[in-house]
Image: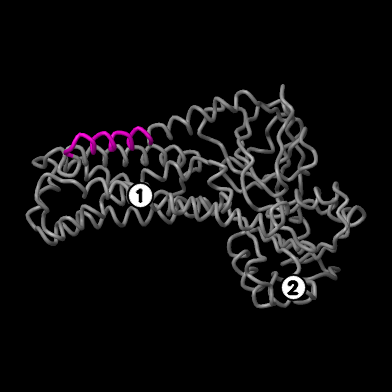
Amino acid sequence: MTGYDTRRRRMLGGAFWLALYVGLFLLPLAIAFTYRDHPRRAFWTEFSVALGFVALAMMGLQFAVTARFRNVAAPYGIDIILRFHKQISIVAGALMLAHPIILFVTRPETIELLNPLTAPWRARFAVAATVAVLALIGISVWRRRLRLPYEAWRLAHGLLATAAVAFALTHVELVGWYVDLPWKRALWAAMALAVIGLLIYVRFVVPALLLRQPWVVDQVVPERGRAWTLVLRPVGHPGMRFAPGQFAWLTLGRSAFAVEDHPFSFSSSAMDNERIAFTIKNAGDFTRTVGAVAPGTAAYVEGPHGAFSIDRYDGNGYVFVAGGVGITPMMSMMRTLADRGDARQHLLIYGAPSMDDLTFMEELEALPDRMRLHIVQVLASPPPDWRGETGLIDATVLGRHLPADRTAHKYFVCGPPDMMDAVERALRRTGVPWENIYTERFNLV
């Protein structure tokens, strides 16, 4: 299959899943407003109800969006899927709020439904669903300001999402106006069962499958930049195949059913399927404990995931732009290229605060002996005898080192969010086509 055919297949796949998503979140609306045996109500009442149904459908579909289905994520990359999940949750929350606000403005008497002592149960469940959604959005958008540990946030996120959908479904059932026919109730029940099925799949089926392919920590290697590399070996199975640059969710020392799984990029070569490695920087929460993990600790790996890979995008050569621990997926790709004996010319531009923050520095210095790789290191605080680039990776630095033909190469960018935004803009200013730039972002919340 040619590169054009592969891109065309991905575009068609992406269009299919997007069309299916739109169709599914409009389906409850179609069910509610067709074949009714009672008269229509005022326009603004019907409109507000329509917004409520769309919001409920979006919330239900979030369970599918975050279920990590590889076929669904393949055309986009799961990091884009997760960013979409975050943004569409805010849209769903806004639509859910608009539903009662329109009613309060056009029918002021409905404000009495906010009184929990006198309101009917259908209104109480509506209020409870709205509060759950607002709390869900709040702890996600302001998690760092609230200083919520990742693990506590994950648990609260799941509970609030489940409660919001359950309360909203109960509200619709108790109102009954739009699901009063037997076939509508049957379809509504089927959609509710689908949400329950997704919960069971994510929380029970996937972990049960992981129990069949356990791993164990073989080595814990300290790295520059306050990072550690965990080397895992398989127990009773042949290992895992992955594309260089991909990532997986990792659970350490606990049951596969624990909610404390974390996404990390592979740092090892994709040519070695019997040993996989994750290089993890101490950034607080779970990551600060990685250095204390003992060899022999049980591990579970759910993946691989992601579209950030040289195996997905072919070019005359690759330009890797990394900041901090963003070097991790780049290292996987460069190690793989070296193991494959790749003869193309490649470029790595690696930015860090200081020499001590250059993770993999010693191995990077040896890589040009195994492959055609030119390395440019950019230090924000260099030592006195430093002769390389200083400051930040900007258009000036890129202009000095990028290949003359900016269109023939593929560009991979990974690092802190601010650095990635700046590098993307700088690459565009230096003549790199936007379709040749690929990024990986893991700012999930």
| Magenta stretch, residue numbers | 180-194
Given contact means CB atoms under 8 Å apart, are the residues at marks 2 and 1 in contact? no
In the rendered structure, the answer to whether residue 388 lies left or right of residue 190 reads right
Examine the rendered structure and indicate whether residue 164 appears above or below residue 328: above
Residue at numbered disc 2: 406
Alpha carbon distance from label 2 to label 1: 41 Å
In the rendered structure, the answer to whether residue 206 lies left or right of residue 185 reads right
Badge 2 marks a residue whose secondary structure is loop
Q: Residue furthest right?
A: 369
Residue 10 in picture, x, y percent from top left: 59, 54
Residue 224 in picture, x, y percent from top left: 76, 50
- Is residue 195 in the magenta section? no
Residue 355 in picture, x, y percent from top left: 78, 59
Residue at numbered disc 1: 25
Residue 282 in picture, x, y percent from top left: 64, 46
Q: Looking at the image, which is closer to me, 243 or 265? A: 243
Question: Tag on residue 75?
Answer: none
- Is residue 191 in the magenta section? yes
Q: Looking at the image, which is closer to me, 133 or 219? A: 133
Q: What residue sits 21% from the left and 41% below the top?
A: 172
In the rendered structure, the answer to whether residue 68 lies left or right of residue 182 reads right
Quarter of the image for residue 249 reads top right
Q: How many marks?
A: 2
In the rendered structure, the answer to whether residue 138 lies left or right of residue 390 reads left
Q: Looking at the image, which is closer to me, 76 or 283? A: 76
The amino acid type, in three-letter code, at marker 1 is Phe
Examine the rendered structure and indicate whether residue 51 appears above or below residue 153: below
Badge 1 marks a residue whose secondary structure is helix
